[in-house]
């Protein structure tokens, strides 16, 4: 692929991003209750969790299972499960699928997602531009009407028992420049349309985004790769917060450790450990909040298990722009 072709494709992708941002800022429709992309804290390790541009960015296939228990030990603490697959199908095209289940007290959310990604490669740069179509359902647990503190005749609650289903489209770009500079942007919920008829009136959709910037520093003399990064999240009905991360990879990237400090509405400190044995990857993180509510729970636990099907270390050494950043 010549340089002119690469530049034309990059310009085209930029135009698509700008058009989608313009459309999103002017759309009105049925707004979803919240954007579930705020759930995970391990996006800097597995960016495919929130960025469609990271779909199929490796030379192998990935199966990822993620579980998070927020406010552990507290009754009805929020719990979430994410299962995803992504991989390259050739001709710079990647495909992916994801399912998300989140339970937050009486509110239950189920999301199914299909995505496609196109990757542009040059001598110094690799960028993927991805699009996802999403089906999202929000429901209230029917058992809530038996709660003595709840008015079981409340019309609003009764209307929510049948749930609300939405169709959504999201766009993202994710890339690595010169095997070192990591960058990405996600534009979630560009088109949020309610599939059911309900009493809600149309409201203006909030414009959301996730910005991801990072840098890979290879300290060859100590066999260490240091990766500082920052993730800015401004999502629908989720207050702005910023994750400041420092990731370290050791022993030919077979061991990893990280620290995250979140500022903004949700102030917390997190620690991550990870290990890789051939195709098996394991990541565990623990987060504690600076808010007073931390006195009533044991913090948040998050676990990810990823299988890299067809992964070869010789390939990965030549492909630093992998999807497990």
Image (cartoon, rainbow, N blue to C red):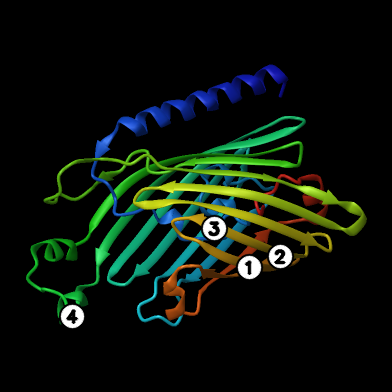
Q: Residue furthest top?
A: 4
Q: Which residue is mark 1?
A: 271
Tell me residue 199's x, y (percent): 11, 51
Quadrant of the rendered image containing residue 168: top left
Q: In terms of secondary structure, where does tag 2 sit?
A: strand
Disc 4/disc 3 C-alpha distance (Å): 35 Å
Q: CA distance from mark 1 to mark 2?
A: 8 Å
Q: Provide residue 127's location: percent of width, then percent of height.
A: 63, 36
**Depth-wise, is mark 4 or mark 3 nearer the camera?**
3
Of helix, strand and loop, which one carries label 3? strand
Residue found at the very far right of the displayed protein: 221
Question: What label sits on residue 262 in the rendered view?
Answer: 3
Q: Could you tell me how far apart the alpha carbons at marks 4 and 1 are, in whole angstroms?
A: 37 Å
Instruction: Report the residue marked by disc 2.
Output: 257
Q: Are marks 1 and 2 in contact (CB under 8 Å)?
A: yes
Can residue 222 be seen here? The reply is yes
As drawn, the label of residue 147 is: 4
Q: Which of the marked residues, 2 or 3, is nearer the chain's N terminus?
A: 2
- Within 10 Å of disc 1 (Cα), the crowding (few <14, some 14-19, many 20+) is some
């Amino acid at each position: 692929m010549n340089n002119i072709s690469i530049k034309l494709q990059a310009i085209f992708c930029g135009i698509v991003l700008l058009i989608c941002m313009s459309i999103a800022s002017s759309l009105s429709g049925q707004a979803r209750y919240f954007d579930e992309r705020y759930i995970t804290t391990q996006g800097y390790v597995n960016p495919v969790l929130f960025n469609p541009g990271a779909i199929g960015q490796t030379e192998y296939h990935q199966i990822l299972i993620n579980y998070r228990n927020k406010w552990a030990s507290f009754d009805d603490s929020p719990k979430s499960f994410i299962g995803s697959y992504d991989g390259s199908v050739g001709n710079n095209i990647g495909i992916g699928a994801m399912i998300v289940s989140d339970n937050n007290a009486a509110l239950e959310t189920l999301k199914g997602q299909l995505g496609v990604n196109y990757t542009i490669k040059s001598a110094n740069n690799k960028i993927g531009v991805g699009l996802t179509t999403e089906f999202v359902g929000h429901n209230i647990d029917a058992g809530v009407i038996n709660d003595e503190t709840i008015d079981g005749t409340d019309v609003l609650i009764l209307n929510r028992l049948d749930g609300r289903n939405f169709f959504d489209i999201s766009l993202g770009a994710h890339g690595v420049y010169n095997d070192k500079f990591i960058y990405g942007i996600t534009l979630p919920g560009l088109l949020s349309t309610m599939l059911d008829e309900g009493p809600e009136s149309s409201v203006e959709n909030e414009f959301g985004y996730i910005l991801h910037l990072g840098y890979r520093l290879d300290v060859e003399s100590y066999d260490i790769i240091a990766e500082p990064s920052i993730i800015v999240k401004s999502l629908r009905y989720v207050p702005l917060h910023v994750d400041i991360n420092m990731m370290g990879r050791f022993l030919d990237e077979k061991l990893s450790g990280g620290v995250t400090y979140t500022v903004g509405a949700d102030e917390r400190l997190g620690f991550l450990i990870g290990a890789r044995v051939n195709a098996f990857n394991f990541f565990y993180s623990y987060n504690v909040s600076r808010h007073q509510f931390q006195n009533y729970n044991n913090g948040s636990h998050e676990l990810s298990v990823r299988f890299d099907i067809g992964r070869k270390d010789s390939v990965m050494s030549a492909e630093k722009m992998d999807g497990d950043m």
